[in-house]
Image: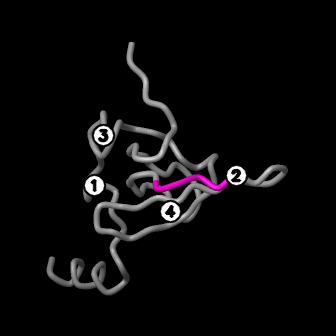
């Protein structure tokens, strides 16, 4: 049985909040005693975002996930990119 530690540089998937479904690599973790801990994540496109620790789930070591990713590889498109993609169909 193998496992992955929750540390900077590992691949994660966001399981709650506004960033749900996004996939990226942990940049760093802010510790706030008595409050929510914040995790900063960078996705494959280069966008960085932050979310609460409870919403983060480690899915791989380094930048390689151990599970198959959903369609789109967990990358959130901007409003313009999403519109162009829908219009091209």
Residue for point 20% across, 84% down = 87
Give SS at disc 3: strand
**Disc with the residue nearer the chain's start (3 vs 4):** 4
Tell me if residue 85 comes above or below residue 73 in the rendering: below
Q: Mark 1 touching mark 2, by CB under 8 A?
A: no
Whether residue 12 sits left or right of residue 32 in the image: it is left
The dominant secondary structure in magenta is: strand
Residue receiving disc 4: 19
Whether residue 59 sits left or right of residue 49 in the image: it is left
Q: Position of residue 56 (x, y in %)?
A: 54, 47
Question: How far apart are the alpha carbons under marks 2 and 4?
Answer: 20 Å
Give SS at disc 2: loop
**Disc with the residue nearer the chain's start (2 vs 4):** 4
Residue receiving disc 1: 73
Q: Residue lying at the far right in this picture: please name it.
A: 34
Q: Which residues are magenta?
A: 27-31
């Amino acid at each position: 049985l193998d496992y992955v530690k929750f540390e900077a540089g590992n691949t994660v998937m966001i399981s709650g909040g506004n960033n749900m479904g996004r996939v990226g690599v942990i940049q760093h973790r802010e510790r706030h005693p008595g409050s929510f801990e914040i995790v900063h994540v960078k996705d494959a496109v280069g966008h960085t975002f932050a979310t609460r620790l409870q919403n983060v789930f480690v899915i791989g070591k380094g930048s390689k996930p151990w599970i198959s990713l959903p369609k789109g590889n967990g990358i959130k498109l901007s409003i313009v990119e999403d519109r162009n993609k829908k219009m091209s169909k």
